[in-house]
Amino acid sequence: MEKLMIVEDNEDIRSQMRWGLGKDYEIIVAGNRQEAVFLFKKHSPQVVTIDLGLPPDEEGAEEGFRCLEEILRMAPQKKVIVITGNGERENAYRALQSGAYDYYHKPLNIAELKVILGRAFHLATIEREKVLLQKSQEEHTVSHNGIIGQSPRMLEVFSSIRKVASSDVAALITGESGTGKELVANAIHRLSSRKNGPFIAINCGAIPDNLLESELFGYERGAFSGAHNRVQGKVEYAHKGTLFLDEIGELPLNLQVKLLRFLQEKTIQRVGGREDIAVDARIIAATNRNIVKETEAGSFREDLYYRISVVHINLPPLRERGEDIILLANLFLRRFSEEFKKKGRRFSANAIKDLESYEWPGNVRELENKVQRAVIMSDASLIESDALGFTPGSMKEKACVTLRDARERVEREMVVAAIETQRNNMAKAAATLGISRPTLYDLVKKHSIGKSLEGEAA
């Protein structure tokens, strides 16, 4: 049975509500703010009613508002209905602005209150099921070292990861900055037979050319000024594991020759050394450049390209991943809300629209940063577009839609508008659109409109 907490100091009203509502809900009763907070933490009811006139301020409303604020601070998603005197309309509006779900004016009418409570419990159930569904989807799609996605393009990537991991060949991962190339490389390593060995990553574009050779292949004592000891390079450290060469397109031509020799012979020589050292390491490379054009231009060796790209995985940009954008945004929102102790945050409808229409030049990394900023900077439980850093100038509609896409969009908008205009009366909505009711139901299902049809006329 669903739990309802009644915060009311008047014993007669408490008895009336317990008697009138006890058959429908498990009733929890509190007579003051302190007791209400204690019982709310203990029982976590889905819906709460609060009489604003609580002791020691029975004639005022401040104690009731403090109770409302404390409950919503603990659980912003809970539905709170405030009960006020008949002439206290300002308090009712203030309560709604503070986050209350609804209000009810005295004198109490149990039948009327039941209607309000029914809607509140129904909405609470829908929201709870939505959260559970999102978590279930995330658990299903979060795989391969935290890579998240359920779009067709990402499901293809997941399939490629599993297939590549089962072999020991070199792999090339391409994609724009921020798409998660190192995550994919790490996932391949963790799923491979080398998972118990080291995963060594090096960014070829972040190290000066004159230091990159010794960083990769190590050096012998006395190889150059300051080389007082023998030092192993990244390639040696990756023995029995995986070496991830990020931004391999930045690798100078002279080091491309040494890397090609390693791939062919599985041996290296340290800087200043003459001894061949056998190393058993798998190579996974990544770049955000068009490596084919680099090869044609002569800035990247063609023979090395073929060696490192036995298997090629291309990561789609975030703007082409459809529903993954909101899936990722909600995941980041929950993560940062917990981290910064601002639980219960959610995106507004406008924020969701802007998240979906933004072009995301920085891809997943940019999305993560925007959500983190919004959680830090926003004090409201509802995250708006401005908190995400969106401005009218930064937004533009996705271009190059197909004729079919445009037709589908217009069709959906017309169906939604007709249903809303006719207040969920499907017969009238169908007549407005000039179609039959069965056709309208098919369109509702096709476009996942999800309108409640409970109020439909027969």
Image (cartoon, rainbow, N blue to C red):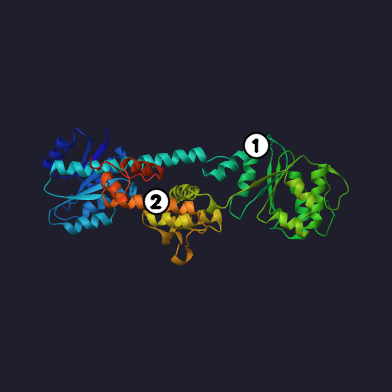
Q: Amino acid at mark 2?
A: Glu
* Residue that badge 2 annotates: 411
Give the percent coordinates (x, y) of residue 302: 78, 52
- Judging from the image, what secondary structure is the residue with disc 2 in? helix
Which residue corresponds to the image point at 22% horizontal and 57% vertical from the top-left? 93
Residue at (47% x, 60% y) in the render: 397
Residue 185 on image: x %, y %: 65, 45
For the view shown, which residue lies furthest in the bottom direction?
393
Q: Is residue 225 left or right of residue 88?
A: right
Q: CA distance from mark 2 to mark 1?
A: 40 Å
Q: Secondary structure at mark 1?
A: helix
Instruction: Provide the residue designation for mark 1.
Output: 163
Q: Nearer the viewer, residue 343 or 144?
A: 144
| Quarter of the image with the C terminus in it | top left
Residue projecting furthest to the right: 274
Q: Are marks 2 and 1 in contact (CB under 8 Å)?
A: no
Where residue 363 appears, as percent x and y from the top left, is 55, 55
Structural crowding at the residue carrying mark 2, measured as other residues with C-alpha within 10 Å and reported as few (<14), some (14–19) or many (≥20) = few
